[in-house]
Amino acid sequence: KKFPKSKFAIVDVSAPGLKGKPKNVRGIVFAEQEAGCLAGVAAATVTGTNTISSVGGLKIPPVDAFIAGYQYCAKKLKPEIVTLNGYSQDFVAQDKCKEVALNQIGQSSDVVFQVAGQCGLGAITAAGESSVWGVGVDSDQAFLGTQVLTSATKKVDAGVTQTIKVVKDGKFKGGVDGLFNLKNGGTGYGKVS
């Protein structure tokens, strides 16, 4: 509001939901559930125990969207599948996510989807140490090891680049969101192990 002639775009924030509904702000939001769905199909395809799990950082909309897509599509492929979910209450401390993942692995999960940022690296480590699959998030985390089945990707770079193009082309409209999904290259999946 202090800079009404400037144009702003905010990643993971819905512009119509902002207080005062500023007309110079465009949201950059993602269909995380679509990427989560692809990860869920991959998990359901490889599970031998019919139990898969997810480790969220905090219970917030982007995390829950990834997890909802993961669980929904896994169950669409295999209705009998059991889905476990837990939250570490942290996006940094890897030991917290590792503990949640190990607990899930102890309950027969043989695919663990991490949706917890840096903390989630602990879940990927737990998967490797337990000889089960891990699924990365946000970017392609295949570089972490052969235990990474794939990653549910959120292509922030694509969202930002496409938003810059909207501004450059003189088509910026504030008070609305740009939705980035599978169709426009804003979400997807990483390398498959």
Image (cartoon, rainbow, N blue to C red):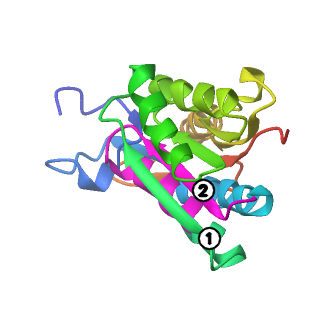
Q: Kindly check if marks 1 and 2 are in contact, taking CB atoms under 8 A apart as contact.
A: yes
Q: Is residue 64 visible?
A: yes
Answer left or right for 139 relative to 53: right
Question: The magenta stretch spans which residues?
Answer: 48-71
Quarter of the image where the N terminus is located:
top left
The residue depicted at 32 percent of the width and 49 percent of the height is: 15
Mark 1 lies on residue: 81
Asked if residue 138 is among those painted magenta in the image, a careful observer would answer no
Residue 52 got which mark? 2
The residue depicted at 52 percent of the width and 63 percent of the height is: 83
Is disc 2 placed on a helix, strand or loop? Answer: strand
Q: Position of residue 17 (x, y in %)?
A: 25, 54
Asked if residue 65 is among those painted magenta in the image, a careful observer would answer yes
56 vs 49, nearest the viewer: 49
The residue depicted at 69 percent of the width and 60 percent of the height is: 49
The span from disc 1 to disc 2 (Cα, nearest Å) is: 7 Å
Q: Position of residue 136 (x, y in %)?
A: 64, 37
User: Tag 2: residue type?
Assistant: Ile
Answer left or right for 29 relative to 87: right
Task: Specify few, some or many for label 2: CA neighbours under 10 Å numbering under 14, 14-19, or 20 or more.
Answer: many
